[in-house]
């Protein structure tokens, strides 16, 4: 009788793609996937470790399955993902019920690690971050008509608040033909919409080819039969080129949408974040994008309560939100992260202030979203 394995994947879409590859490795080794992790012999918890709330959710999920293990419902608990990579020794020491802890550089060894754990061995393995496979078979956890396609891994931007380079390593693109081959396979299996993801999609190709290649990749993806929509997520504003915008404007398959996390709008705060730009340059950039791609939907994320953020600087961000009227926006309270430059800065704001400011921005955005929605009444759109 096949051993049943369940998966709980937390965090972002990049982590979800990693989980889909882990599932494929498990199935190829003869295990059976179980839809309800509580009824499985083995549970894999693919964790997120990006910000404090995500870490808390990951720990709570692990502890929940530890209770099931103590009750005899689960035999083996496997912890993978960003939390396992970032807090290696702590997880092994603090959660002895975890039978397997795999860093992201050892994802390829998941099936062997599970078999060793079933035989009674405790497994804790870590490799180089760059050993995380950029491609490979997947068992989709999304509807097959709308899927994620990871085009790169890691990040070289070095924002002072962010731990992703510490967890995921430096930026590395997948070869274009490798991306196109997976896209063709997904289309052949029913995919109508591809959502391109990476820590920075707009940097795609720079490491492999010496120049930005996202625009060329999009043109090639548009040639694939069966695909209807192609969407770009997680870009960096400085690398949104006119070539990229021209492709987005001219190719009917490319959704008129781009996700550009801006993080703030005040020049001093952005400099402290090690990010380029200021209020005026960001306004100019967003207006330029809208001029070149009429009707484009802009999504962004912002951080409220960055160390030293004054009331005046916060108000400048609020004015920016009101001025830009983003179609989609999320605002997060700044999260102190170990081993980051921002985490060591003086003038950390208290939690109440940070969360209150984030709530103000989101209330502001709710009003904007309602207004934008009202403007669509009576229109017919393809969905």
Image (tube, grey):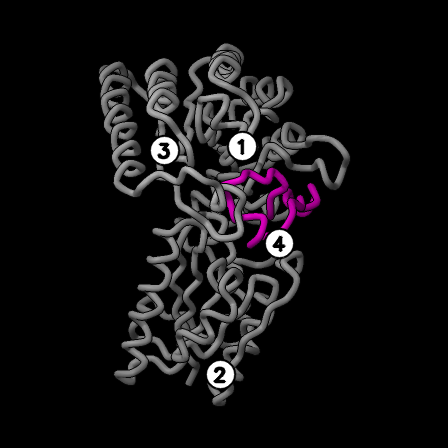
- Element under disc 2: helix
State the mark number for residue 304.
3
Q: Earlier in the sequence, mark 2 or mark 1?
A: 2
Q: Earlier in the sequence, mark 4 or mark 3?
A: 4
In front: 19, or 382? 19
Q: Which residue is mark 4?
A: 135
In front: 141, or 345? 345
Q: Residues within 10 Å of mark 4 (few under 14, many from 20)?
A: some
Calculate the distance from the C-alpha at mark 4 to the C-alpha at mark 1.
20 Å
Q: Which residue is mark 2?
A: 117
Q: Residues within 10 Å of mark 3 (few under 14, many from 20)?
A: many
Q: Left or right? Give the position of 210 relative to 357.
A: right
Q: What is the magenta range?
A: 154-180
Q: Left or right? Give the position of 13 relative to 203.
A: left
> For residue 8, what is the image quadrant?
bottom left
Question: Quick check: is 155 in the magenta stretch?
Answer: yes
């Amino acid at each position: 009788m096949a051993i049943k394995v369940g998966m709980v994947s937390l965090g972002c879409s990049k982590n979800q793609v990693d989980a889909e590859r882990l599932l494929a490795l498990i199935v190829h080794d003869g295990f059976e996937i179980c839809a309800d992790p509580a009824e499985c012999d083995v549970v894999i918890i693919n964790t997120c470790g990006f910000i404090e709330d995500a870490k808390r959710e990951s720990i709570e999920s692990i502890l929940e399955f530890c209770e099931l293990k103590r009750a005899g419902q689960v035999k083996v608990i496997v912890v993978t993902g960003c939390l396992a990579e970032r807090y290696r020794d702590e997880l092994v020491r603090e959660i002895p019920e975890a039978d397997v802890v795999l860093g992201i550089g050892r994802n390829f060894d998941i099936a062997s690690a599970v078999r060793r754990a079933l035989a009674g061995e405790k497994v804790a393995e870590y490799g180089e971050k760059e050993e995380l496979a950029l491609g490979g078979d997947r068992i989709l956890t999304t509807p097959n008509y709308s899927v994620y396609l990871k085009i790169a891994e890691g990040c070289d931007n070095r924002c002072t608040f962010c731990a992703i380079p510490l967890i995921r390593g430096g930026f590395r693109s997948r070869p274009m033909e490798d991306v196109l081959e997976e896209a063709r396979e997904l289309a052949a299996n029913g995919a109508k919409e591809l959502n391109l993801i990476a820590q920075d999609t707009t940097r795609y190709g720079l490491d492999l080819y010496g120049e930005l290649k996202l625009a060329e990749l999009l043109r090639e993806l548009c040639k694939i039969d069966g695909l209807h929509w192609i969407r770009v997520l997680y870009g960096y504003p400085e690398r949104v080129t006119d070539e990229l915008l021209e492709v987005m404007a001219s190719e009917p398959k490319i959704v008129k949408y781009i996700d550009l996390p801006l993080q703030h709008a005040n020049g001093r705060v952005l400099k402290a974040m090690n990010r380029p730009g200021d209020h005026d340059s960001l306004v100019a950039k967003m207006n330029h994008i809208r001029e070149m791609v009429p009707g484009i939907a802009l999504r962004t994320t912002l951080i409220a309560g960055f160390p030293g953020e004054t009331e005046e600087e916060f108000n400048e961000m609020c004015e920016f939100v009101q001025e830009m009227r983003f179609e989609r926006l999320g605002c997060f309270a700044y999260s102190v992260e170990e081993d980051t430059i921002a985490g060591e800065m003086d003038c950390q704001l208290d939690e109440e202030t940070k969360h209150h400011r984030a709530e103000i921005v989101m209330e502001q955005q709710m009003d904007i979203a309602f207004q934008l929605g009202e403007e669509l009444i009576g229109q017919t759109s393809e969905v």
